[in-house]
Amino acid sequence: MRPLLFLATKILLTTFAFAAFAQTPAAPPHNVVLFVADGLRFRMVDDRTAPTMAAIARDGVSLRNSHALFPTFTTANASGMATGHMLGDTGDFSNTIYTGWEVPSAGNSSTPFLENDAVLGEVHAHFSGNYLDEATILKLARDKGYSTASIGKLGPALIFDSTERSGGQTILIDDATGTPKGIPLSAEVTQRLQAVNLPPAAPSRGANGAAGNVSTPGTTNANVVQQDYFAAVTTRVVLPMFKERNKPFLLVFWSRDPDGTQHNQGDSLNVLVPGINGPTSFAAIRNADDNLARIRSALSELGLLESTNIIVTADHGFSTISKESQTSSTVATKFSDTLPGHLPFGFVALDLAHALNLPLIDPDDGYKIIGEGQHTKNGNGLIGGDRNKPQVVVAANGGSDLIYIPDGDTTTAKRVIDFLLTQDYVSGIFVDSKLGKFPGTLSLDDIALEGAAITPRPAIAISFRSFDTVCGEPVLCTVEVADTALQQGQGMHGSFSRADTWNFMAMQGPGFKSQFVDPAPASNADLGRTIAHLMQLDVKDNGKLVGRVLSETLPNGAVPAVTSRVLVSDPAPNGLATVVNMQMVGETRYFDAAGFSGRTVGLSSTILPAATQ
Ligand SMILES: [Zn+2]
């Protein structure tokens, strides 16, 4: 009798305990606002230039050892933030990639620019419905029943939930909103826009979009008008809606400034100083900061500030453009849109076609053959073969380019690498390890570009040379050779210099420590992972190249052990070796800078002490 009674009691107690547990659900997570100031360099933020961001860094957590993912471009880093994975998994290797198939919305180009909602839709459809092949934080958040919105710059805004194209779940507002190319607005959002007298279409960039040309300076206007609309929609429509729903929310605000303005600024036509440090660029930094200040005020007025974690990051840093080379075959040719002796847009494609003695086909201009004195429309090129079977493909991006060898021919790869090693504009060559080892180069695997990606993997990634104009702090006045339609003296990014990898990063809110300077390395992939942790999202990974939860930023979190490493390739016959400066936390890798010794700002060939020592 006693044992039975004991058993019954035990069952009863277990049932009570279970019921008690079931009746006490975990506290709902705090809200998260992820604010991305596109192209904001870490060291540009202080009380004068960006007071709101400076205050968040000072009062919350300052991530001074922050990292953009290489290639240091927008869609690539958006994919990292959105999935918590590095680019070898997300397959978003750069803003312009080779898809191996002609994308209708990109004018049938096989080298589409991904900052386009229609192009993203078609690329998804082609690659099994999700080219990233990982779930994004916005999708996981709405799966949990949370409110979600992504507002701002065309391309990265949609990448945060790009398989949701109905507008019915995640609120998506970008440059294309209100046009047939945009993601539709729900009836509820349209009605609320009307109620506060905001139009249902985003304004264009206006004067801010003027890039100028070789004889006309670019813009002197920050992107104020367009971003005023995005900030107004966020503060007067979306946040009040989220407040009424009374559920946790995840909101992404992607400020095109300072990036778009730093690219196009007309402060420095054809000269390297002030470059991207002129008044127009400072106005753009202030514009981004003003947008953040408005969002913070709205959170405060709605009584949401105490329950919202604000995370501020930049997708990448920035540099001033150089178009000079002593070695390129193109500088002896006259181009109608290029200063004599300067590198034309598409110089890598032109140089490689010349070196391989093969025709150059323009994938962005009806697959026409490029003649003497011409360059391809968007810098991209198919070299040899035909439009369906090119031997070599160049995807031009800016401070770094991608080169594809679709048939995987190692002899072609060797000829391309041998040529690249002779060019003064190259600093760092990374080769798909499937193609073998080549002296002077490291592998894509060495920089986390070989993973579970389902888009075509480049054969070679090259970073371009960088130097500084001597301003006392090299990362603040870095100049890089760039494959771009923009002019010398305007702005670009994409390289493996520390000027381009060192992005601004800070966070503040109930989930974070206060007044904490984080010495440990952090990356944009870590932010995706950290947001998933804060919001208790159910993450399932396909690839293994994952960021880490930045646990040292959380209350009671300890600073992890950090190790520093320098990777050095075997030297090429001419003595060049690709060097990578990296840090590690456990298995998670952070790349500070890479390239050839003496050709990359921030690159050291000696081993540095770990950040936490
Ligand atoms: Zn940019």
Image (cartoon, rainbow, N blue to C red):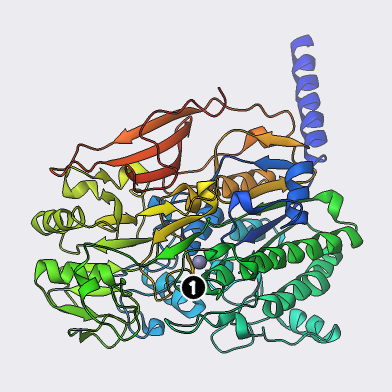
Q: Is residue 544 visible?
A: no
Residue at figure coordinates x 30%, y 71% from the top left: 343
Crowding near the residue tagged with mark 1, few <14, some 14–19, many ≥20 C-alpha atoms within 10 Å:
some
Kind of residue indicated by mark 1: Glu
- Left or right? Give the position of 128 relative to 102: right
Q: Is residue 505 visible?
A: yes
Instruction: Please state, as top left, top right, bottom left or bottom right, where the N terminus lies in the image.
Output: top right
Q: Quadrant of the C terminus?
A: top right
* Residue under numbered circle 1: 115
For residue 38, side relative to residue 481 (left or right): right
- Furthest residue in direction top, as rendered: 2
Secondary structure under badge 1? loop
- Residue 206 occupies quadrant: bottom right
* 354 or 533, nearer to the observer: 354
Name the residue at 74% across, 40% down: 512
Task: Please determine whether, in this image, residue 586 is positioned above or below residue 243.
Answer: above
Q: Position of residue 375 (x, y in %)?
A: 27, 80
Where does the image place residue 165, in percent across and percent down from the top left?
A: 56, 75
- The residue lying at 74 percent from left, 33 percent from top is 555
